[in-house]
Image (cartoon, rainbow, N blue to C red):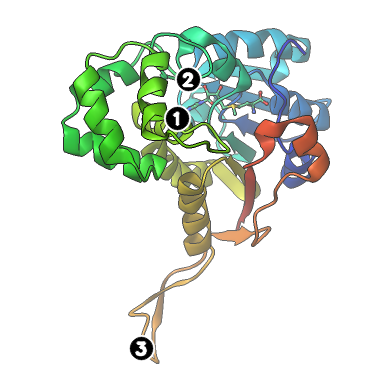
Amino acid sequence: MNTPHKPVLYKEIIHALQPISTGRYVDGTVGAGGHARGILEACAPDGCLLGLDVDRQALALARENLAPYGQRAHLAQASYNSILDVIRGLGWNAVDGILLDLGLSSMQLDTPERGFSFAQDAPLDMRFDRDLGLTAAQLVNTMPEADLVDLLFKYGEEPRARRIVRDILKARPLTTTAQLAGIVKRAYPEHSRIHPATRTFQALRIAVNDELATVGDALPKAVSALRRGGRLAVISFHSLEDRIVKDFFRSASKDLVNPPYEQLYEVERKAILKEINRKPVTPGEEEIKDNPRARSAKLRVVEKL
Ligand SMILES: C[S@@+](CC[C@H](N)C(=O)[O-])C[C@H]1O[C@@H](n2cnc3c(N)ncnc32)[C@H](O)[C@@H]1O
C-alpha cells in the first residue's frame, strides 16, 4: 500500500465488523484506505465497501490503494455525517458494518503545509477539508479573547489557556504553526514530557473541523444506516470524543423509561443497540511499540438490535 499511515487496531476492526461476502460496509473515514482494504479482503469475493473522506488528498490515495478491488470499492468526498444521503445515492438501503476511525492521519500530520503539526513550520491551517471553513489562523486572529480561552480549556483541557491567549492577542496576526508553538512554549518554561503545544493544537483542530459536533450528529445517523445485526465500530483518540461515543452507545443500549423514578413505568423507547464490549478495546504493547500514534486509541463497538 502506498501510505505512511498504519491503520490502528486493524485486526480488532476486522474481528468487530465480521465482514461477509454478501455484505455492504462503510468506512466513514477512509484516509489512505488501510482499514478499508482489510474489510474488502475479508468480504471477498462479492462484498462492497463505500469509503468517505472530506480530504481530497486522502481520497486520491485511497483511490490508488483500493483500485485492485474494482467495482467493489466506492469512494466519495463527503463527511461521515452525510452517510444516509450517500448510501441512498448508491441505492443501498442498509449496511452491514460501519467504521469511524476519528481524528487525523499520519499523512495529514506529516504534511507540513496542512498546518496540523507544531514540529514543522507551516501556515496555520488544520482543515481536513481544504475547500471549506475557517483556517486555524483565521480563528486565532479573529476570536474574542474569552471565547479563545474557552476553546483551549474545553477542547484542549489546557490549564494555562488564559496566559496563552493573552500572548496570542499580543502577537496577532499569527500566520504559522511555529509562531503559535513558540507562544505556548513560553507559557511552559519548565520541561514537560509531551510538547506543551499538543493541547493547544488539538483544541484548534477540533474547533476548525467542528469535530465533536460532527461525531455527535453522525452516531444516530450511522445507527439508522445499519441493518439489524449490523455493527458500528468507532476508534477515538481523546477523551472528549470517546465520552460522546461512550454516552451515546450506553444510552442507546438501555430501554428508556418515563418517568424513570416511578414503580409502574412505561418503556418509552426500547434499546436499539447492544454493546459488544463494555470497556473500550485498546492497542497492545506490541502495536504501540510499532506505532506510537496508536497509544491513545480506544475502540468501541455496538450491534444494532
Ligand atoms: C485516522 S484517519 C483514517 C485512517 C484510515 N482508517 C486508514 O486506515 O488509512 C482519519 C481520516 O478521517 C478524515 N475525516 C475527518 N473528519 C471527517 C469527516 N467529518 N468525514 C469524513 N472523513 C473525515 C480525515 O481527513 C482522515 O483522513
- SS class of the residue under badge 3? loop
- SS class of the residue under badge 2? loop
Q: In which quarter of the image is ligand 1?
A: top right
Q: Is residue 289 visible?
A: yes
Mark 3: which amino acid?
Glu
Mark 1: which amino acid?
Ala
Residue carrying label 3:
262
Coordinates of residue 271 in the picture (x, y in percent) = 52, 65
Residue carrying label 2:
116
**From mark 1 to mark 3, how far is it between C-alphas?**
50 Å
Q: Which mark is residue 142?
A: none
Task: Tell me the residue at 61%/38% (across/down).
Answer: 98
- SS class of the residue under badge 1? helix
Residue carrying label 1:
197
* In the rendered image, the vertical position of residue 90 relative to residue 26, given as above or below: above
In this picture, residue 6 sits left or right of residue 261: right
Mark 2: which amino acid?
Phe
